[in-house]
Amino acid sequence: MTSAPTAAPPNAPILDALLPILCCPRDQGALSPEPAESRDVRSATLLRCAICDAAYPVVRAIPRFVPTDDYAGNFSLEWTVHRKTQLDNETSRISEDTFRIKTGLTPDEVRGKLVLDVGCGMGRFADVIVKWGGRVIGIDLSLAVESAQSNLGGTGRFQALQASVFGLPFKTESFDIIYSLGVLHHTPDCKKAFMALPPLLKRGGHIAIWVYSSHTFPDCGVDEIRDGFIRRFTTRMNSRALHNLCRALCLIRPRWRAFWHMLLPGFVYHAIPRLHSYKSYDWRVLDTFDWYSPVYQSKHSYPEVCDWFREAGLCDVRPLRFEVAVRGHKAAGGA
Ligand SMILES: C[S@@+](CC[C@H](N)C(=O)[O-])C[C@H]1O[C@@H](n2cnc3c(N)ncnc32)[C@H](O)[C@@H]1O
Ligand SMILES: [Zn+2]
């Protein structure tokens, strides 16, 4: 096992914390910024592995550990168009409230901590960490990293990396806190994606995830079967065309709810839901696109997810109130 990296002081800028914990995803080799006079990863043009000589480019101040956005092109579009839609502002704290409910984490637990956001999207939850006084590294497979970096890079407490959860460029036991909200069920193998995370957690650290619920959305439910059929087409559509379709659908008035529910249950749930009527038009378009566009979409139960946590050697495994959110803890003395 790689020894724990030397910690940067808790209030140092994020770039001081990043280089000591970065490594080559293929062989865990140390990475050096080139050209040699670069002061940090943002000003480098590439990062080179000391073992295999692989070169990872740094483009627009973001290190890239994957050559493309692979199956996540829909998310590249989603988070480019909706770069700010879900960011908290003076009048809204929906992301902060959602973060509390889905992770159980509090500002006291986060302050001064080094945090990994797995599948950060445009950074709505990383923004909460920054405001709570933590420092956060956000990874994402898609071009969402461009939006996240532009939203939060200027804080000095956030850095985005384009990488896949299946090839993370970090040394073991690097982070105080790891969370992943709404991401792992959009990968080809949700459990395998989760299992990549606990080794990166420091002893005594906390981890929280939220995945789609098979309690709320059972695969055998009539609505799910109908939406599963529709998704066979929408996941193959050009992302821009599907997004335009969602924009048109979201103009529909709620009084036709029953009719639309019969045709497109996921649309009614996400675009004109009874409980979320406070959501703006853009937010409803985003949620509808987010339901019908992802290539992978799996659902999971509390017992299943809690078992993953225990199998990974985590303790204090706690199902949270929001289905299916679970948090756990890595014992200070090991498993
Ligand atoms: C529904 S979005 C959630 C984004 C963010 N967590 C949020 O809640 O706003 C799912 C994200 O997972 C990312 N993703 C999918 N597969 C991934 C993978 N293998 N590695 C890293 N990120 C991935 C997508 O690019 C997308 O940004
Ligand atoms: Zn290497």
Image (cartoon, rainbow, N blue to C red):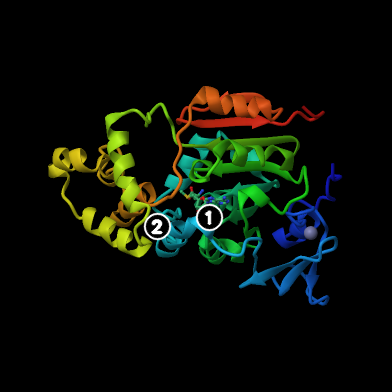
The quadrant of the rendered image in which ligand 2 is seen is: bottom right
Give the residue type that dot 2 points to.
Thr
Q: Secondary structure at mark 2?
A: loop
Quarter of the picture holding the C terminus: top right
Residue 105, located in which quarter of the rendered image? Answer: top right
Q: Is residue 134 visible?
A: no
Tags 1 and 2 touching, CB below 8 Å: no
Q: Nearer the viewer, residue 329 or 133?
A: 329
Q: Nearer the viewer, residue 28 or 302?
A: 28
Residue 190, located in which quarter of the rendered image? Answer: top right
Label 1 near ligand 1 (CB < 8 Å) = yes
Is tag 1's residue or tag 2's residue first in the polypeptide sequence? 2
Give the residue type that dot 1 points to.
Gly
Tell me the tag on residue 85: 2
Percent across and percent down for residue 200 are 72, 43
Q: Is residue 283 above or below residue 212?
A: below
Q: 41 left or right of 321? A: right
Q: Is residue 31 above or below residue 202?
A: below
Percent across and percent down for residue 125 are 53, 49
Q: Nearer the viewer, residue 111 or 282?
A: 282
Tell me which residue sits at (85%, 50%) in the image: 6
Q: Nearer the viewer, residue 57 or 121?
A: 57
Quarter of the picture holding the N terminus: top right
Residue under label 1: 123
